[in-house]
Image (cartoon, helix red, strand yellow):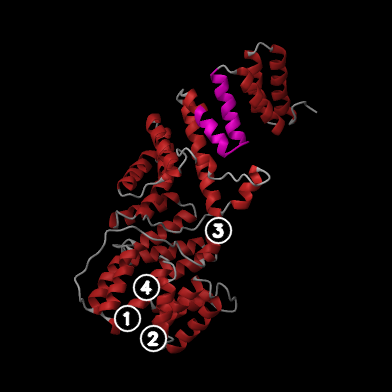
Amino acid sequence: MRKTRKIISERTMVLSLTFSLFAGFVCFTSFSPASAMSTQTYEAEIDKLFMNTQFNDAHDLCLKAIKENPKDRVVFLRKMGEMYIVAAKGKSGIDSIRLAARLAPKDAQVISTCSIVEFLAGYVVKAEQLAQEAIAINDKNGRAHAALALCGLRNETLATQEELDRAMKLAPKDVTVLIIAGIIHLRKLEYDQAEKAYSQFVKAYPNTALPYYQRGFFRREVFNNSGALKDLDEVIKHHSKDIYVRTTRAKLNKKTGRYKEAIEDLNVLEKMGGGGNSSFARRAECYEKVGNLEAAVQDYKKALDAYGVTRPDYDKKYAITHAATRRSAWNKMMSGGDATELSSTKATWLKYILLLQKTGKYDEALTELVKFTKVFPGDLNSIYARQNLYKKKGRWIEALADINMLISKNPNVAEYYTSRADIYKNMGNADKSAADLKRVQNLEKFGTPEGD
């Protein structure tokens, strides 16, 4: 089953970062170490995988290490907690670090790690308590001061910057401390300082993927797309099979107009089994941008097939006959996942229909619109597309009925009157055509079709 990562939306970047920084999973090539390795060898291999952003591999190797070296399980439980900070995996990271804290209540590194994980999981009171305990155990532990600095995001009485400065001085190469520094500055909207913190991480570990991963996603969230692309390039150099990172790079390439590069990434994703309905739809748009319209059509078909649109009974999926209206039926049964799926399906389907029209496949486009309107009845964009197709086919009466309905819904759209004027002209009604063109002028000049 394909694994996906959670990512921070641009709208909720600052708030959600408190709970999970650039969280998610990666797909990977399984790592199979020799059995019965020493604790030190396991540590080295786990750190190598973790710094290469192969979080699932590192997590699984921790489990194997605990099984083979149970006396040193605190070491690996702590590492699983550290992984949670950058790659949340359900409750496993929280449960692991909590167990480590119970087993090693006097280990400042363990307790401070637990504090950080508790804070990111939303348990801020417990987090502050643990941070204070870690400092009491060892006031020279940099991670403990980083944990307390993080708690300062929710408790203004704590000296956040002072604690963070001390953490950076005491542990300048502690990966967790460097990541927490970025979180704190970003949460405080101190973007320049966050950039410096992530760049310090890159400088400390320039030949690994994780620093570029952290900085790349930070840069993407603050709309530094060119910088993000450079960092994601570095991540992929180290871990070419990272589906999440490659998907993100494909999105950024598309967003910045690098359509050929986006297509290359999406081709690789398809070969790795990481492609899906959204990937096909995204590649279709890129193909359309570079003028390869037939490839775009084929990818839209793949996307719609993945969404299930091509199933004969697809229109029945969201139909509930016992509800008073179709809309109320949807509102009663619609979950967030359903709404998201429908939104993506709707957008992809309309783009496909418009591309069929663009390539002169009018009959195919009309056939798709019949199916579309069964699922999305009353959608104004589809009705506008349909009246255009009726015009292309010379079906003026049907086109007129559609455009009249659109005007009744929104009488202040100049484009509607322009289209109706064209319909009237082709139906031989010059006076009505001229009247509609006058309405267009009134809308442009006065903001109303009648020029009031």
What numbered label is drawn on residue 73? 1
Q: Amino acid at mark 1?
A: Arg
Residue that mark 4 sits on: 80
Q: Nearer the viewer, residue 47 or 88?
A: 88
* Residue 427 x %, y %: 64, 13
Describe residue 240's horizontal placement relative to residue 365 as left or right.
left
- Please, what secondary structure does the residue beneath circle 3 have? loop
Gap in Å between the C-alphas at discs 4 and 1? 11 Å
Res. 323 visible in picture = yes
Tag in front: 3 or 4: 4
Secondary structure beneath label 1: helix
Task: Residue under label 2, please give it.
Answer: 103
Residue appearing at x 56%, y 54% in the figure: 335
Residue found at the very far top of the displayed protein: 428
205 with respect to 136 (left or right)? left
Q: CA distance from mark 3 to mark 1?
A: 37 Å
Is tag 3's residue or tag 4's residue first in the polypeptide sequence?
3
